[in-house]
Image (tube, helix red, strand yellow):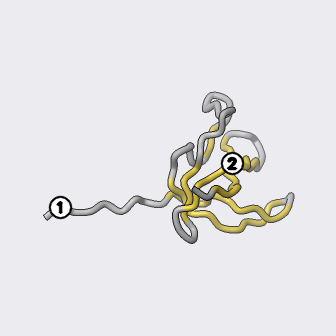
Amino acid sequence: MTTEEVYVYLEDEGLDVWRPIRAVRVDAQSYVLLRPDDYDPDNEKWQFPPGSLVACERRQTRDGEIFAAVRRVNVPTSKSA
């Protein structure tokens, strides 16, 4: 299992805040966000919670370029015959 650092936007912070977390790469642009040991949903409101499958892309912030989770990816469902 290969993990990479991605950034998740924190909502309700009053300014733009991106939190670095580990994520498992699923394919070229899709990642599953891992839950860090210090995760507290009462303290931080993530745009995408741990366990989410997200698309990531390079984003420019005031502090430089980051690899950010930008949208949720829908898991394809298979249809039974």
| Residue 40, x across and y down, in percent | 64, 30
Give above or below for 70 relative to 35.
below
Q: Disc 2 residue type? A: Ile
Q: Which residue is mark 2?
A: 21
* Residue 35 point in image, percent of width and height: 60, 40
* Residue closest to the eye, 16 or 68: 68
Does 41 appear above or below 24? above
> Which residue reaches farthest left?
81
Residue 49 percent coordinates (x, y): 56, 43
Residue at the extreme front of the image, as rendered: 1
- Badge number at residue 80: 1
Tell me if label 1 and label 2 are in contact, CB under 8 Å. no
Residue 53 to residue 59: above or below? above
> In the displayed image of the protein, which residue is found farthest to the bottom?
28
- In primary-sequence order, the first of circles 1 and 2 is 2
Seen in the picture, residue 45 relative to 47 is either above or below; the reply is: above
Residue beneath the point at 78% across and 46% down: 15
Amino acid type at circle 1 is Ser
- Where is the C terminus found, in terms of image quarters? bottom left
Rendered residue at 61%/32% (across/down) = 41
Q: Closer to the camera, 29 or 45?
A: 29
Q: Secondary structure at mark 2?
A: strand
Secondary structure of residue under mark 1: loop
Looking at the picture, how far across and down is residue 78, in whole percent? 27, 62
